[in-house]
C-alpha cells in the first residue's frame, strides 16, 4: 500500500513541496521504494530504491559515496530564464540540481565525496524533437556537474527510447531499463501534459548495470 512521505522527515528549510511522496514496497527488489515524478526529487540516507520513468526529461542521481546518502531529481527544461519566477521550481534543471544537492548537504553529505549518474534525454516526443529538449537537458546536466566539480561516473543519455531508472542511494547501484516497445503512450502523454503545465506556470528491454 502506498504511503505519503511526510515533510516532517526532512530538515527545516528544505523545499518539501517538491519532495516525491509516492512510497511503496517493491516486490522485485524486496525493498521500500519511492517513485519520483516530473518536477519532483527525493533524497535519503536509508536503504531504499528511488524509481522514475524518463522520456525527454533527465534525472541526476547524486550520492555521497562514503556516507551512502543520495537522491534523484527529474526535470524537463534546463531553465525558465533568470527573470522568470517559475525557475524556482524543481521542474527546471537549474533549481532541481540546486535543491537536490543542498538537501544532500543537510543530511550530512560532503561535497568532496559526491558522485553522479545521469539518465534520460530521449527523443520520444515528436512535438519536442524540433526544440531539442532532450539534447539541451543532457548538455545542461553534464555542464552543471562539471562546473560543480561533481564527477559523472556513468551516464545513459539521448537515444530514442524512454527509460525506467532504479537508483539505490545507499550503495550507488543503478539500473536502467530501455522501454523498447512501441507501447509507450503513457510516457509520451505524461510528458506532453507536463510540458503543457510548464508553459502555464508495461515495461520491456534489457537491464544494464551501471
Image (tube, rainbow, N blue to C red):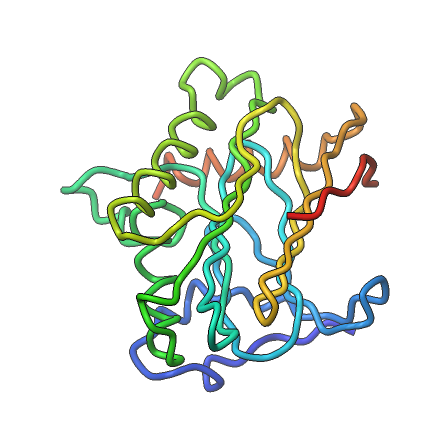
Q: Is residue 32 above or below residue 76?
A: below
Q: Nearer the viewer, residue 41 or 152?
A: 152
Q: Is residue 37 left or right of residue 206?
A: left
Q: Residue drawn 43% across and 81% down?
A: 10
Q: Is residue 79 above or below residue 150?
A: above
Q: Is residue 121 above or below residue 44?
A: above
Q: Residue drawn 50% across and 45% down?
A: 118
Where does residue 133 sit, x and y in percent of width and height? 43, 26
Viewport quadrant of the N terminus: bottom right
Where does residue 68 sit, x and y in percent of width and height? 52, 74
Q: Is residue 127 above or below residue 36?
A: above
Where does residue 188 sit, x and y in percent of width and height? 63, 31
Q: Residue furthest left?
A: 83
Q: Residue furthest bottom?
A: 8
Q: Quadrant of residue 99?
A: bottom left
Where does residue 67 sit, x and y in percent of width and height? 47, 77
Q: Is residue 94 left or right of residue 40?
A: left
Q: Is residue 37 left or right of residue 110?
A: right
Amino acid at each position: 500500500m502506498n504511503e505519503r512521505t511526510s515533510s516532517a522527515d526532512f530538515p527545516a528549510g528544505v523545499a518539501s513541496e517538491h519532495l516525491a511522496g509516492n512510497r511503496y514496497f517493491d516486490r522485485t527488489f524486496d525493498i521500500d521504494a519511492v517513485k519520483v515524478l516530473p518536477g519532483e526529487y527525493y533524497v535519503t540516507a536509508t536503504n531504499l530504491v528511488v524509481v522514475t520513468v524518463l522520456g525527454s526529461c533527465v534525472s541526476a542521481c547524486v550520492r555521497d559515496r562514503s556516507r551512502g546518502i543520495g537522491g534523484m531529481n527529474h526535470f524537463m527544461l534546463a531553465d525558465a530564464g533568470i527573470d522568470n519566477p517559475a525557475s524556482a521550481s524543481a521542474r527546471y534543471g537549474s533549481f532541481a540540481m540546486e535543491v537536490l544537492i543542498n538537501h544532500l548537504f543537510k543530511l550530512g553529505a560532503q561535497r568532496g565525496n559526491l558522485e553522479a549518474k545521469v539518465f534520460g534525454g530521449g527523443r520520444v516526443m515528436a512535438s519536442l524533437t524540433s526544440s531539442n529538449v532532450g539534447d539541451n537537458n543532457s548538455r545542461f546536466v553534464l555542464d552543471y556537474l562539471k562546473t560543480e566539480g561533481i564527477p559523472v561516473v556513468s551516464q545513459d543519455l539521448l537515444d530514442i527510447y524512454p527509460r525506467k531508472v532504479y537508483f539505490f542511494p545507499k550503495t550507488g547501484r543503478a539500473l536502467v531499463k530501455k522501454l523498447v516497445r512501441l507501447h509507450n503512450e503513457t510516457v509520451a502523454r505524461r510528458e506532453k501534459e507536463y510540458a503543457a503545465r510548464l508553459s502555464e506556470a508495461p515495461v520491456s528491454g534489457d537491464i544494464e548495470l551501471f
